[in-house]
Image (cartoon, rainbow, N blue to C red):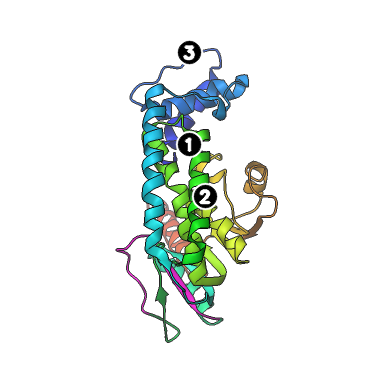
């Protein structure tokens, strides 16, 4: 949904400005049109409950087939992580959702002074730092966890149970969307396996816009780790962003507190702590340099005005 904000925001403005006018949409895909109609009519009329959507018979048939295929493929995929007797979990200070952003290097360096840092790359092709404070950094992929052989039946049952719940509650979705939801139980079991291999004191996350962080949150709580989220952007053309409405962290690092308390806190977990930290990438020297440049430009404009 993050790529459809301008269309949804423009439609919402039109509805608010002309509530009695008929809204006609051109050049917008069916899913975005459905979201706009739900926001502008169904929600206001009280009949826009998402769980009341029925979906077409074709969608249901396709999604049932997809769920059955996932019920076979995902338990088999978990077998790759199964070990007869895996080693005990390794304790570390920080695990991080690694996205190869140089701005994160200071976070890793500060954490490395307190203990081991383990990076979890978002994709395989990302560049990886070699050392922090003279120590090699361990890199473990998302699917690099372990499952004890004795615990495999419980993991497979949990996966199948969650898959059935998703089919029952979200089977009305279009197949392309259901395919995304269908993978959630498998991804959650991958996180559970990952934290059996490494047990952090804290996990530093950059994926506030992905549902995967909600899946990870539950598994981090199960091992007693803190989940730290970072707001990587600030609202500009709209205050209400769908991807920011549903979060699950223990602490959420933000640019400022008031906007989020006024417009988002009602949807966020009651026990999630907001931590204002200011701009993430703007350092004092950057502000000073920018301010100095603006002053020079202003003085130059004044000088030209006087001369002319």
- Measured as percent of width and height from the top left, residue 292 is found at 46, 65
Q: Report the residue marked by disc 3.
A: 22
* Element assignment for label 3: loop
Q: Report the residue marked by disc 1.
A: 167
Discs 1/3, front: 1
Residue 127 lies left or right of residue 22; in this view the side is: left
> Dot 1 surroundings within 10 Å: few (below 14), some, or many (20 or more)?
many
- Measured as percent of width and height from the top left, residue 134 is found at 42, 87
Q: Quadrant of the N terminus?
A: top left
Q: Which label belongs to residue 234?
A: 2
Q: Main secondary structure of the magenta part?
A: loop
Front residue of 62/201: it is 62
Q: Residue at x 38, y 28 (%)?
A: 61
Discs 2/1, front: 1
The furthest residue to the bottom:
134
Q: Are marks 2 and 1 in contact (CB under 8 Å)?
A: no
């Amino acid at each position: 949904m993050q790529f459809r904000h301008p269309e949804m925001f423009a439609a919402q403005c039109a509805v608010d400005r002309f509530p009695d006018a008929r809204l006609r949409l051109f050049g917008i895909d069916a899913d975005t049109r459905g979201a706009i109609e739900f926001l502008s009519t169904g929600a206001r009329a009280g009949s826009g409950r998402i769980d009341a959507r029925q979906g077409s018979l074709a969608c249901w048939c396709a999604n049932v087939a997809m769920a059955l295929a996932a019920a076979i493929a995902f338990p088999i995929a978990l077998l790759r992580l199964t070990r007869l007797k895996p080693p005990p979990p390794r304790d570390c200070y920080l695990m991080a959702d690694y996205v190869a952003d140089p701005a994160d290097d200071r976070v890793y360096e500060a954490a490395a002074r307190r203990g081991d840092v383990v990076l979890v790359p978002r994709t395989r092709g990302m560049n990886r730092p070699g050392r922090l404070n003279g120590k090699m950094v361990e890199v473990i992929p998302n699917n690099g966890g372990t499952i004890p052989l004795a615990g495999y039946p419980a993991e497979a049952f949990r996966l199948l149970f969650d898959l059935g719940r998703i089919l029952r509650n979200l089977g009305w979705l279009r197949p392309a969307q259901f395919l995304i939801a269908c993978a959630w139980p498998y991804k959650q079991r991958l996180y559970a396996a990952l934290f059996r291999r490494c047990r952090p004191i804290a996990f530093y996350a950059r994926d506030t816009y992905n549902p995967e962080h909600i899946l990870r949150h539950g598994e981090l709580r199960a091992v007693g780790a803190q989940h730290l989220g970072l707001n990587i952007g600030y609202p500009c053309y709209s205050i209400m962003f769908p991807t920011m409405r549903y979060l699950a962290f223990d602490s959420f690092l933000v640019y400022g507190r008031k906007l989020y308390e006024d417009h988002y806190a009602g949807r966020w977990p009651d026990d999630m702590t907001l931590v204002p930290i200011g701009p993430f990438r703007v350092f004092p020297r950057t502000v000073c340099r920018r301010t100095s440049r603006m002053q020079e430009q202003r003085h130059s404009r004044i000088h030209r005005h006087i001369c002319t």
